Amino acid sequence: MFDNSEKSFDSSLSGLGNFSTYPDKDPLSSKPTEPGSQQLPSLTAPLDYAGNTRATARNVGTLTGLQSFSDWVGSADLNDYYKFNVGTQSNFSLSLTGLSADADVQLLNSSGTVISISQNDGIVSESIASQLSAGTYYVRVYQYSGNTNYNLSLNATALPADNAGNTLATARDVGTLTATQSFSDWVGSADTNDYYSFNVGTQSNFSLSLTGLSADADVQLLNSSGGVISSSTAGGNTSESITSQLSAGTYYVRVYQYSSDTNYSLSLTATDVAPTPTPTPTPTPTDWYSQNLLDAQIITLTRSLAADGNLSRNDMISIFRDAKDGSVIDASELTDLRTLVSNSTLFTMADSVKVLSNKIANSDVANTRSGFGNLFAGSSDTQMENLIGKWFLGTDRPDTGYTYSYVSGSLFQNGLSADDIYQGAVGDCYYVATLASIAQEKPEYIQNMFTDNGDNTFTVRFYNNGVADYVTVDRYLPTSGGYAVYADWGGGSSSSTSNELWVALAEKAYAQLAESGWSRSSTSNNSYADIEGGWMDTVIRQVTGLSATSQSVSNMTQTQLINLVNSNQVLTAGFVYGAGYGVVNGHAYTITSYNSTNGTFYLRNPWGTSHANVTWSQLVSLRGIIQWSNT
């Protein structure tokens, strides 16, 4: 359990869900340790066909199908290693069966780092499935208790060839598109993006279709700079389609995974736009607004607001509110709002404005979960104002049992520091401890996370699988007697001008984001309670967009951890297997420094007090979980 300033993690979450559930377990196992249960070695041990180290591993060779092996592990032969190669991206699986005592199995990379592990109790069979790149790997079968024979099956099946580039720079070049061209390929966890490049030589009507899906994949049409012109994001295995009128130039199509792996068929078509005859020799100037929008009032307002080549946040708020005329949003007005969002690149619209406008004009899970609902032809002016408030003004604040008060001060005071973090009454140590490390090692990520809108609101950026998503928060924060309840702002009462708001606003934004269904569970609400419990590596990805690694300290070396401390990588530690040496169980910390004189690592407690200095051997005995950014 946490200190009384922090609640226990939600046990429904994987990872750092409830630090205190199994204080006496091995960090890589769900099985309790059993002192005294070790069996004595057999006097007549069976033959051992597998090596006992990686260096002496039994060489399986290149794995292209199913291979099976029989051997044993026990007190006299604790480990069996098998070495194999895959020559191309492959789906790999193994099974460990025929057990008469408890044995477990690991999949290791060429350096011996654990990729995956299976540790069922007793004589239950073990299994691992993983997607592997070409290279060398090891399987380790090892005793947990007793002596047992086993049957080990290894299988690898090559993934389909990837014929499309994974970036704009390596896009598959279709050439000049003058009719229909079709392509077949796949996307999945090992190949999340496929890019195609094509040209149109003249004004053209363009269309694409993405069919033959067995899982959820989406598609985007991009301009020559990689800006999104249009997207199709139907759910499940529903086919996707895009139509657009394109000027002469270079364009890209991006097919990308949303969930699971799927083959697909992509068809691209371009046909010349027939020239429009003019009634007089004098050509009529092209007016995009009258050609593409329907409602006269929206046409006039948008043309005026976009005269500077930009549709800003305030411009889009004005256009959304203009659509409320007559106290209802009719079909033409709704179509115009969606047309503006899908053509955002014409107006150099900021990414945050485009994303938030899309949540209003089209849909977002949080619209439904909040009770406001998605816009439809016939929506009321009240519904529109609720959605504007939710996404652009931050008025749909997270649920809490406390009173919201306007808080004075500024976003930052004298720069950023890990010591800006003081966790309050919500159990989100995993989140604020990660913010502390980002503030220390990569403060620019925190600075760029916020956009000050100049009206006492802030747009806050997060990343969903590397794609930016946004929410807006205002200056109203939960208080008790005028003081902070959750993340403290440091200056004192809510009226103090020395308050530093970034930590409290980042926490509030994370609570609001939960309702969109991707940052927490799919059933999370806009609530502080719904951000209790989690893991730091997830926060690293969501706040910075960087990839991250989680490793038990028992699978690291002291030198590796020292090198991480001395880098500028985000670095955190979590403890779930017991307390000691000043470390609280069920809690997350920021690792801020290493003292080479006395050999201790400094663990900063996000409470702002009760910090700890621990040696390497103490970290190992506590079985800490170390999580860090990969860059």
Image (cartoon, helix red, strand yellow):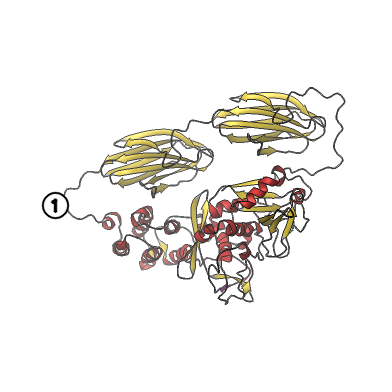
Q: Residue at x 58, y 76 (%)?
A: 496
Q: Nearer the viewer, residue 554 or 373?
A: 554
Q: Is residue 564 above or below residue 453?
A: above
In x, y percent, where is residue 285? 20, 55
Q: Is residue 369 visible?
A: no
Describe residue 337's horizontal placement relative to residue 150 as left or right: left
Q: Is residue 401 magenta?
A: yes
In x, y percent, where is residue 56? 71, 27
Describe residue 214's horizontal placement relative to residue 37 as left or right: left
Q: Nearer the viewer, residue 118 or 84?
A: 84
Locate the N terminus by quadrant: bottom right
Q: Nearer the viewer, residue 386 or 207?
A: 207
Name, please, the residue furthest toward the left: 281
Describe residue 337's horizontal placement relative to residue 151 as left or right: left
Q: Is residue 254 above or below residue 492?
A: above
In x, y percent, where is residue 596? 70, 53
Q: Secondary structure at mark 1?
A: loop
Q: Nearer the viewer, residue 465 or 602?
A: 602
Number of dots carrying numbers: 1
Provide the residue span drawn in magenta. 396-407
Q: Residue at x 64, y 36 (%)?
A: 111
Q: Is residue 318 magenta?
A: no
Q: Is residue 290 above or below residue 268?
A: below
Describe residue 67's horizontal placement relative to residue 471 as left or right: right
Q: Which residue is mark 1?
A: 279
Local packing at callout 1 (Cα closer than 10 Å; few below 14, some 14-19, many 20+) is few
Q: Dominant secondary structure of the magenta stretch? A: loop
